[in-house]
Image (spheres, grey):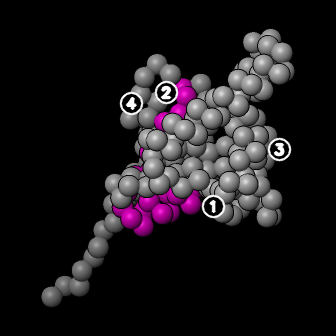
Amino acid sequence: MTLRPAVAADAEFLYRVFASTREHELALAGLPAAQIEALLRMQFAAQTHQYRAAYPGAEDSVILIDGAPAGRLRVFRDGEEILLLDIALLPEHRGRGIGRAAIQELQVEASAFGVPVCLHVARTNAATALYRSLGFQVEGGDDVYQAMTWTPAPVTVVGAAG
C-alpha cells in the first residue's frame, strides 16, 4: 500500500469511492438509479466543499495497491493532532487490511510527533470495530456520530546518571 496526493484528474475516481460507500443505503429507498446518481453527486460535492472550507490544507490522497487506485485518505494536521477526516476503499479492496495499514501509518506518525489521531465516525459504521481494535477510544459525540481518539504512549527518556 502506498499513497499519492490526489489531483484534479482523480475527481471521478474519488466520486466512485464515495458513491461505493453510500449506494446501498440509497438503493434501499427504492429510488430510480438516475435519482440515486444525482443525489450521490450532490452529496459528494457538498462533502468536498465542506471539508475544503472547514479544513483548508487537508491532505487528500489516493490509496494505491500495486500502483492501482484502491481508495482515498483525507487527513488534516494542525500540529496538535492528526485528524482522520475520511478513509474509504472500493468494495473489492475492503476487508484486506488496507485501511488498517493506512491508519497504522498515521499512528506511527502521531507517535513520532507526540500527538493523537482523532476522527468522527457514524455510530452505525462497521469501521468502529476497526478503530477500537487499533486502540481508539470514544471521547464523545452525539446521536449520530462519535468522536474517537488514539493517543500515543508517552515517551520515557532515560537520562544518564551523573
Please, what is the three-letter code of the amino acid marked with disc 1? Pro
User: In this orientation, which residue lies closer to the viewer: 3 or 138?
Assistant: 3
Q: Which residue is mark 1?
A: 5
Q: Which residue is mark 3?
A: 92
Question: Does residue 106 appear left or right of residue 102 in this picture?
Answer: left
Please, what is the three-letter code of the amino acid marked with disc 3? Glu
Q: Position of residue 104 (x, y in %)?
A: 56, 56
State the separation of the CA atoms marked 3 and 1: 22 Å
Please, what is the three-letter code of the amino acid marked with disc 4? Gly
Which mark is nearer the camera, 2 or 4? 2
Magenta residues, start to end: 104-123
Q: Position of residue 38 (x, y in %)?
A: 74, 25
Q: Based on the displayed image, in which of its 4 quarters is residue 46 positioned?
A: top right
- Is tag 3's residue or tag 4's residue first in the polypeptide sequence? 3
- Is tag 2's residue or tag 4's residue first in the polypeptide sequence? 4
Query: Can residue 128 be spotted in the picture?
Result: no
Q: Is residue 28 shown above or below 61?
A: above
